[in-house]
Image (cartoon, grey):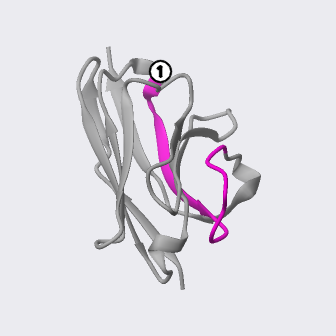
Amino acid sequence: QVQLVESGGGLVQAGGSLRLSCAASGLTFSYYTMAWFRQTPGKEREFVAAIKWSGGTTYYADSVKGRFTISRDNAKNLVILQMSSVKPEDTAVYYCAAPARFWNTVVLTPTQITYWGQGTQVTVSS
């Protein structure tokens, strides 16, 4: 079955950097647009970034644009979220996600997601 396993979360000071990884298995990785979402208690899950299955095209939430970078390594079935200049408001559980294969947009909502990881906690201290 499909598994998305996140790693790299933890505690970081404001202004610092953190690198999240998502290892995918059980699917033909290069066929899938990959995304990151995040969620804080009492709030809806929100889109952070996505990278298209065909490579190259990326999209970011305004709140992280210029600070976060999403990338993928199709040979290793990995998607990476490099977080820089982090802020306390970036504190959340971060989820790796994928819509159905060959999804043609990178503007995603939670209802369009087929597969979710279990999440990894990121805490930014001020």
Task: Please say if 2 is above or below 105.
Answer: below
The image quarter containing residue 102 is bottom right
* Quadrant holding the N terminus: bottom right
Say whether residue 94 is magenta.
Answer: yes
Q: Nearer the viewer, residue 57 or 32?
A: 57
**In the image, farthest residue toward the right:** 111
Residue 33, image x and y in percent? Answer: 55, 60
Q: Residue at 46%, 72% (x, y): give it.
A: 30
Say whether residue 113 is magenta.
Answer: no
The image quarter containing residue 74 is bottom left
Residue 25, image x and y in percent? Answer: 43, 78
Residue 57, image x and y in percent? Answer: 50, 47
Q: Nearer the viewer, residue 53 or 24?
A: 53
Q: Amino acid at mark 1?
A: Glu
Q: Residue at 67%, 47% (x, y): give it.
A: 108
Q: Nearer the viewer, residue 33 or 7?
A: 33
Residue 62, image x and y in percent? Answer: 56, 23
Number of dots carrying numbers: 1
Q: Which residue is the site of mark 1?
A: 89
Q: Which residues are magenta?
A: 90-107
Q: Name the secondary structure under disc 1.
A: helix
**In the image, farthest residue toward the top:** 126
Task: Please say if 18 is above or below 72.
Answer: above
The answer to whether residue 100 is left or right of residue 84 is right
Q: Residue at 40%, 44% (x, y): give it.
A: 121
The answer to whether residue 104 is left or right of residue 66 is right
* Quadrant holding the C terminus: top left
Q: Residue at 28%, 34% (x, y): give it.
A: 11
Mark 1 surroundings within 10 Å by alpha-carbon count, few (fewer than 14), some (14 through 19), many (20 or more): few
The answer to whether residue 62 is left or right of residue 74 is right
Task: Please say if 7 is above or below 40.
Answer: below
Q: Nearer the viewer, residue 108 or 23?
A: 108
